[in-house]
Structure formats: C-alpha cells, structure tokens
Amino acid sequence: MMAKPFHLQPLVDLAEDRSQAAAQVLGKLKQAWHEAGAKLDQLHGYLNEYRDRLQRQSQSGLSALQLRDYQSFIHKLE
C-alpha cells in the first residue's frame, strides 16, 4: 500500500524555512541589543567619571575654558 502524498508539505517546508530565518534575525537583534546596552553602560560610566572630575577640579579651581569643555562633553554624553 502506498502512502498518501501530503499535499501541504511545500507549505510546511516554507513555514519551517521562514521560522528558521526569523530565529536567525532574532538572534542577531538580541546580540545587537546586548552590545548597545554594554555601550550605554560604558557611556554612563564616562558621564559619572567626568562629573566627578568636574566636581574635584571645581574645588581646586577651573578656568572658564576648562569649565566650558567639561560642560560641553557632559552635555554630549547626556
């Protein structure tokens, strides 16, 4: 006795292919999201470090140019 052909098999194959492609895209997006989060954390670290430097430098004296440079850089990080 011959097995009946499954007429919808091409659609099942197509759905599996698309599912695998979507899983690959999702994996790449998750990796990019993780990397962006790490960069954001690094930038927050720089921002905090620069704010601390500004506070320490302010106590010992800053020129107007130094203050402007600190504020400009902090503004870019914010």
Image: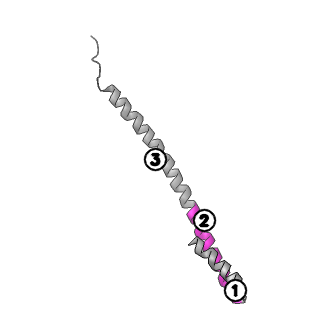
Magenta stretch: dominant SS?
helix
- Going from N to C along the chain, the mark reached first, 1 or 3, is 3
Query: Where is mark 2, residue-wise?
Result: 42
Does 64 sit above or below residue 30?
below
- Going from N to C along the chain, the mark reached first, 2 or 1, is 2
- Neighbours of disc 2 within 10 Å: few (<14), some (14-19), many (20+): few
Q: What residue is shown at x 37% (from left), y 29% (from top)?
A: 13
Q: What residue is shown at x 70% (from left), y 82% (from top)?
A: 66
Query: Where is mark 1, residue-wise?
Result: 64
* Residue 6 sits in quarter: top left
Q: What residue is shown at x 69% (from left), y 89% (from top)?
A: 59
**Quadrant where the image shows the C terminus:** bottom right
As measured in the structure, the alpha-carbon distance from the residue carrying label 1 to the one carrying label 3 is 49 Å
Q: What residue is shown at x 48% (from left), y 42% (from top)?
A: 24
Q: Secondary structure at mark 2?
A: helix
Query: Where is mark 3, residue-wise?
Result: 26
- Neighbours of disc 1 within 10 Å: few (<14), some (14-19), many (20+): few
Q: Position of residue 39 (x, y in %)?
A: 58, 61
**Is 76 left, or right, of 6 in this rendering?**
right
Q: What colouring style does the render use?
A: one colour
**Type of the residue with mark 3:** Leu
**Type of the residue with mark 2:** Gln
Q: Position of residue 57 (x, y in %)?
A: 70, 84
Between 60 and 69, the one nearer to me in the picture: 69
- Is residue 56 located in the magenta-colored stretch of the structure? yes
**Is 16 left, or right, of 50 in this rendering?**
left
* Residue 43 sits in quarter: bottom right
Give the magenta-colored segment's residue range: 39-59
**Mark toward the viewer: 1 or 3:** 1
Label placed on residue 24? none
Furthest-top residue in view? Answer: 1
